[in-house]
Image: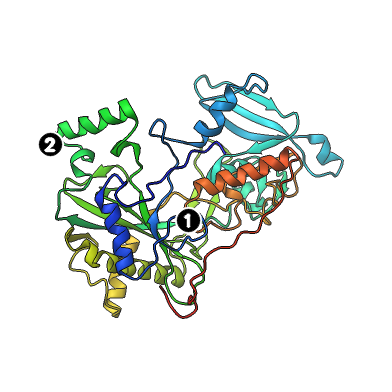
Amino acid sequence: GPLCVTNYENPGSRTNILFDVLEAAGADAGYPITKDTNGYQQEGFGPFDMTIDQRSGTRCSAAAAYLRPALKNPEQPIDLFTNTLVRRILFDDESSRDGKAPRAIGVECEDLSSGEVFEVHAAKEVILSMGAVGSPQTLQVSGVGDRAALERAGVKGIVHHNPLVGSNLQDHLEVYLQYLCTQPVSLYPVAAWTLRHFHERVAVGLEWFLRGTGVCASNQFETGAFIRSDAGIKHPDIQYHFIPGCVVGQLDFLPHHGFQIHVGTLRPTSRGSVTIDSADPKVAPLIDPNFLDTDKDVEDMRKAVRLADEIIQQPAFATYKGKRLAPDAEMDVLSSSKASDEAIDGWVRESSHSAYHLSCTCAMGKVTDSSGRVLGIDNLRVVDASIMPSMTSGNLNAPTIMLAEKIADDILGRRLASEEEDWYVHPEWETKQR
């Protein structure tokens, strides 16, 4: 398809030696090496795919891969409204009066620059692609959702009662294990906002501007891992991202040479919700991720943290591993004592954050069907990560694009033959964790 994907498959080809060290540490710990975590064998340590266009060294977003080329097609002109808010979905009053299912006929929009409110009418269907927060919010302010909740929020005119709209919110939770690096090989000189090493920052910037290569042409998640947390689990339920630097939040690098491993479980059992508190679409909805609501989720995160620290203790990291910064070096991570369990659980609650994989709030079978059509409504679809019934065991960007590709085929009446693909299962998964 048009989505550009690349990876640094072979050790020695990557932009930082620490990516190779992580892979070697995984092998030291007894985990398999896989060349394609999105192919036959997800389980193991190896290169991660990145949606980067190697021709320019830039990210290949959905806009770059699909929207911008479509805007250039004179045979199928597209009107693109920017800085515009969809206020609500418009429905045909006649269908409800005749006792038929409500029929979507368009959307009411607001130009946020001028304040002008206008309508756009659909020749065939209305398609919401507003994400796991925006899609359920727009359905709810339009009168599609739990009747009692919508009335409390001040919505006038309930179009269709479905209490499951906005429920079933799922997201991946992450914590960062951070370590100082004893060798001057991390991203620190070029990534931290400091005047020191200014010439190095200029050099890598110029390489990217002129050639589209180098450190700036990578998302700096070049290797990682998918592993199983315990014996008896058939396919990976833990994902590790790795970055050769230490960051605070998402953007600010600590002024030290270091590295960090992002620890997250893949199939949490806790469920959250997205609920409107006002009929005004400009008022943000109430987003309750409900992280760590179940004992299993707490236990799984604890296992994931311990297994991650064990990897960093492997011989491959011996020349690079310095003091652990997070969690605090004094915390006993590896022992299975009650005190250690409580310390890890407390640190996870204080330090964890969203992996930005919000999904499942308009889930298939609950709010939509398998083609994204909203149940109980005609001419209305949702096509985004909100319609996943459960999260994928990994990142959501490419799976969401795949989902949209398949529904686009359905809308256009294209029927592609299904194919059965085999996938790797550890031969002793029932009795061994690795």
Q: Which of 165 and 150 is in front in this view?
A: 165
Residue 393 percent across, percent down from the top left: 50, 59
| CB-based contact (under 8 Å), mark 2 and mark 1 | no
Q: Which three-letter amino acid code belongs to the residue tagged 2?
A: Arg
Q: Which three-letter amino acid code belongs to the residue tagged 1?
A: Gly
Residue 373 percent across, percent down from the top left: 71, 46
Q: In this view, does 306 lie above or below 190?
A: below
Q: Is mark 1 on a helix, strand or loop?
A: loop
Whichever of callouts 2 and 1 sits on the residue coming sooner in the sequence is 2
Residue 261 percent across, percent down from the top left: 31, 57
Residue at position x 41%, y 69% from top?
300
Most extreme residue toward the left, as rendered? 196
Determine which of the numbered discs, if any, sits on residue 372 in the image.
Answer: none
Quadrant including the N terminus: top right
Q: Nearer the viewer, residue 373 or 121?
A: 373
For label 1, count other residues whose C-alpha is less than 10 Å away and answer few (under 14), some (14-19) or many (20+).
many
Residue at position x 52%, y 69% from top?
425
Q: Mark 2 points at which residue?
A: 196
| Residue 389 occupies quadrant | bottom right
Q: Mark 1 points at which residue?
A: 394
